[in-house]
Image: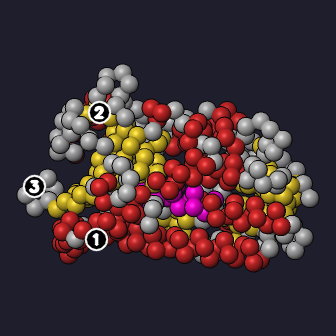
Amino acid sequence: MDFDLIIVGAGPAGLCLARALRTSGLSICLLEQQALGALQNPAFDGREIALTQHSAALLRELGIWSLLAEPTIAPLKDALVLDGGAGAWQARMSISHALSPKPELGFLVANHHIRGAAFEAAMAEGPDQPVLRCAEQVNGIRSDAQGARLTLAGGATLSASLVVAADSRHSSTRRAMGISADMHDYGRTMLVCNMTHSQPHHETAWEWFDHGQTLALLPMNPCSQTGLPRSSVVLTLASQQLQPLMELPEAAFSEQITQRFAHRLGDMTLVSTRHAYPLVGVWARRLVAQRFAVVGDAAVGMHPVTAHGFNLGLRSIEVLSQALTRAKQLGHDLASPALLDRYQRTHQRASRGIYLATHALATLYTQEQAPARLLRQIMVRTGERFTPFKRAVAASLTGLH
């Protein structure tokens, strides 16, 4: 057996799993399609990750939080949900950090900063350092009672007691192991970028379900050059409507986004590159197979509207890493059916409700018919008046429920 564990995918999920197992005594191999340079110095990709208090605590335990530079961590104190246009009929619901036991609901950290810190923590030099094989693609995978074997595109073959797929919601490794997934294409694409604005954001995240578009605002730390308030802006539209915005000159784009936010943040100015991502939700029907498991987005790929994607991924890593560490300590089989079944049941219990609720919400807010608009108005207005509901939402956002 070449390794105890092979992790396919050295994105945030795969790296966090490798880091969580650094002191377990397991021999680990990380396989990644990207080149080493892309892992060591991840490029800005526009995505800001909303971390719950629970996720921040996990990253502290893994030694990743301390590797994030302080200016890259922005507090997320409150949340605001808006529905409808900017007129008198607009509904709103505010979620205050005062409804939770913490001074903020969570934190915002750019995805590329998390990737860089996770790589540094996972690959720190030491006797338990994982073996990293970059620019490698898996061509085949098979498993039996004795172990799992991977065939790489270059012709090499690797074996392990257990293979874990952390290679995105479109995981080819999951598919090769015969695990099907329910995929929902929402028919929308989100544009993400960083913008400064003249009015403060008060460390409040916005989710604005406007007619014909969805706008989100994720509060960041002030711009280091101008001192102006800065935010990650997310605009969701049908793909054919979004493409012209991607091609606009910067000044025209800034004016267009200022208008779409109804000038509520004053003048807005683009200060980063623009990135577009199709919105697809994924639910793997199984999380395990013989000597095989999936984590992160390969297990559950969330629509970003409730900001739970990476947080759920970290929970899958927490559950699986604890089970594998204990199995190693007791001398048990890392890939016993009982261990893998417990992992599957635990993570599916934790994620199914959130996934289905997020899917229902995202589906409702992509419908523009009058009944759907009326239902959205009723939901937001009722939520604003019902404090126990808002307290439950705050608990969900902090991850402390």
Neighbours of disc 2 within 10 Å: few (<14), some (14-19), many (20+): many
Q: The N terminus appears in which quarter of the rendering? A: bottom right
Q: Check disc 2 and report the residue beneath it.
A: 229
Q: Amino acid at mark 3?
A: Gly
Q: Secondary structure at mark 1?
A: helix
Residue appearing at x 32%, y 35% in the figure: 230
Q: Position of residue 315 (x, y in %)?
A: 57, 61
Colour scheme in the image?
secondary structure
**Mark 3 touches mark 2? (CB < 8 Å):** no
Q: Quadrant of residue 225?
A: top left
Among all residues in the image, which is located at the extreme front? 101
As displayed, is residue 310 above or below residue 365?
Answer: above
What amino acid is found at the position of numbered circle 2 in the picture?
Answer: Pro
Which is more toward the observer, 66 or 142? Answer: 66
Query: How far, Cα to Cα, is label 1 from label 2?
Result: 32 Å
Residue drawn at point x = 31 percent, y = 22 percent: 226
Query: What residue is rendered at 34% in x and 39% in y?
Result: 231
Q: Secondary structure at mark 3?
A: loop
Q: Secondary structure at mark 2?
A: loop
Residue assigned mark 3: 87
* Residue 188 visible in this rendered orientation of the protein: no
Residue extent of the magenta highlight: 303-317
How far apart are the alpha carbons under marks 3 and 1?
Answer: 28 Å
| Rendered residue at 45%/32% (across/down) | 71
Q: Which mark is residue 130?
A: none
Question: Label 1: which residue?
Answer: 388
Q: Which is nearer the N-term, disc 1 or disc 2?
A: 2
Which percent across, then down, holds residue 104?
Answer: 36, 49
- Where's residue 56, x and y in %? 51, 50
Q: Is residue 315 magenta?
A: yes
The kind of residue tagged 1 is: Pro
Marks 3 & 1, CB-CB < 8 Å contact = no
